[in-house]
């Protein structure tokens, strides 16, 4: 098995492939935005570990205290993403990456590791059934069907911040909260913005650009959150068809 993994650092960040599916020889606005976002997060203990190939084999996690999600807890790691797709799939790389995260957490004296899940697997969220094989359990839920999964080493557990369970905002417009953690966000925002302009749909796009804003969000969040008519809809990135379904409500 190829075990040539690389952790991104502030020194190699500019030169390394970021492991998402975007393929472009030209500068891609989403990828460059992600690099900038990572350059600040790495200094906070954010870990991006990837297989040394131009493919989608990576894990991203961070100390929960500095993770841009409305989840609270002491001394945990939060896993944003764990993906293995394409040709590398089926070679045990996902297990290696998860085991690396768990070993790292124990070595640093963490209380455990947590991640966002759902009663039914959602697109754009890491595979929760895979995480449960390592002992992750549901420790908190929302009325929208989202779950907080955690593997505790000492019996303590994190939880969704109370505001994350609100799932309501005053605005009735299509409202999207987003950050630059995912390279796809730039293109999805632009697609939705164009659709709304052409079809005269009132929409607000709110960039989450500080840790405080992320912790105070009125919904669960991994890097994206959608509201319509004042109610929370999804953490899934929206293509045009998905957007049309929401707007029909």
Image (cartoon, grey):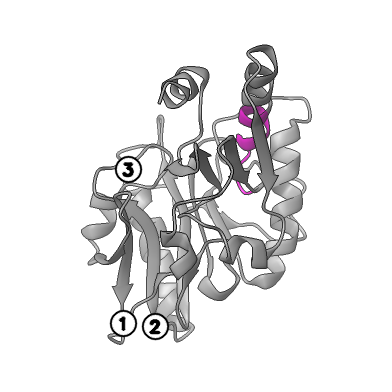
Evaluate if marks 2 and 1 touch, with contact meaning CB atoms under 8 Å apart: yes
Please provide the residue range marked out in magenta. 181-189
Q: Is residue 184 left or right of residue 154?
A: right
Residue drawn at point x = 70 percent, y = 36 percent = 30
Q: Nearer the viewer, mark 3 or mark 1?
A: 1
Q: Is residue 145 left or right of residue 8?
A: left
Residue 76 in percent (x, y) is at: 45, 76
Find residue 153 and name its label.
1
Alpha-carbon span between mark 3 and mark 1? 28 Å
Depth check: give the residue in front, 37 or 98.
37
Q: Which residue is labeled 2 in the image?
A: 111
Residue drawn at point x = 30 percent, y = 54 percent = 143
**Mark 2 vs 3, N-terminal side:** 3
Tell me if residue 183 comes above or below residue 134 in the rendering.
above
Residue 31 in percent (x, y) is at: 70, 38
Evaluate if marks 3 and 1 touch, with contact meaning CB atoms under 8 Å apart: no
Quarter of the image for the C terminus: give it: top left
Residue drawn at point x = 52 percent, y = 35 percent = 55
- Say which element carries label 3: loop
Q: Which residue is labeled 3 in the image?
A: 91
Tell me if residue 152 comes above or below residue 8 in the rendering.
below
Alpha-carbon span between mark 2 and mark 3? 29 Å
Depth check: give the residue in front, 115 or 32.
115
**Mark 2 vs 1, N-terminal side:** 2
């Amino acid at each position: 098995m190829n075990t040539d993994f690389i952790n991104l650092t502030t020194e190699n960040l500019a030169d390394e492939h970021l492991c998402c599916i975007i393929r472009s020889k030209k500068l891609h606005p989403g990828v460059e935005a992600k690099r900038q976002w990572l350059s600040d997060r790495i200094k906070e203990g954010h870990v991006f570990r990837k297989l040394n190939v131009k493919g989608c084999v990576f894990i991203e996690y961070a100390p929960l205290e500095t993770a841009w999600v409305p989840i609270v807890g002491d001394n945990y790691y939060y896993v944003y993403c764990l993906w293995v797709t394409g040709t590398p799939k089926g070679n045990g790389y996902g297990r290696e990456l998860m085991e690396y995260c768990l070993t790292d957490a124990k070595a640093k004296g963490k209380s455990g590791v947590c991640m966002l899940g759902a009663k039914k697997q959602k697109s754009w969220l890491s595979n929760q059934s895979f995480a449960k094989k390592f002992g992750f359990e549901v420790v908190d839920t929302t009325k929208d069907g989202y779950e907080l999964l955690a593997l505790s080493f000492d019996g303590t557990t994190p939880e969704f911040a109370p505001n994350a369970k609100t799932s309501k905002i005053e605005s009735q417009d299509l409202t999207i909260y987003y950050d630059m953690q995912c390279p796809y966000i730039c293109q999805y925002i632009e697609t939705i913005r164009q659709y709304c302009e052409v079809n005269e749909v009132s929409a607000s796009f709110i960039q989450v650009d500080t840790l405080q804003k992320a912790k105070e969000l009125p919904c669960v969040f991994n890097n994206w959150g959608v509201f319509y008519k004042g109610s929370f809809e999804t953490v899934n990135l929206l293509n045009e068809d998905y957007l049309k379904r929401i707007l029909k409500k």
